[in-house]
Image (cartoon, helix red, strand yellow):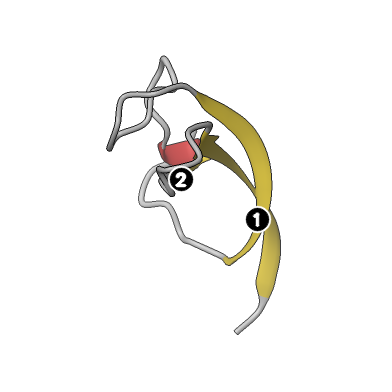
Amino acid sequence: MKLIPTKIYKCKSAECKAWVREEFAASPQLCPICNGEMHRSMRHLPAVQNKFKK
C-alpha cells in the first residue's frame, strides 16, 4: 500500500484525537467529535478515490 502526504485538519484539544482529510472537512473547521477548533497538518495516508470532481 502506497502512502502519500495528505493535508488534514486535526483537533487542537490534547484529549481529542479526531482528524479529517482536508477534502472532506466541513467549513468552518470544527471538530466533529468535541466541536473544538482544528488546525492544518499533514499525515501520510493511503490514496482515496473521490466519487466527485472539484
Q: Residue furthest front?
A: 15
Q: Residue at x 47, y 33 (%)?
A: 13
Displayed quadrant of residue 27: top left
Assign the N terminus to one quadrant of the image: bottom right
Q: Position of residue 50 (x, y in %)?
A: 42, 52
Q: Residue at x 42, y 43 (%)?
A: 15
From what the image shows, is residue 32 above or below residue 37? below
Name the amino acid type tagged 1: Arg
Residue at mark 1? 43
SS for dot 2:
strand
Name the amino acid type tagged 2: Trp
Q: Position of residue 41 (x, y in %)?
A: 66, 40
Q: Residue furthest left?
A: 33
Disc 1 to disc 2: CB gap under 8 Å: yes
In primary-sequence order, the first of circles 1 and 2 is: 2
Displayed quadrant of residue 31: top left
Left or right: 27 as drawn, with respect to 48:
left
Residue at mark 2? 19
Q: For the residues marked 1 and 2, what is the alpha-carbon distance in whole angstroms?
A: 10 Å
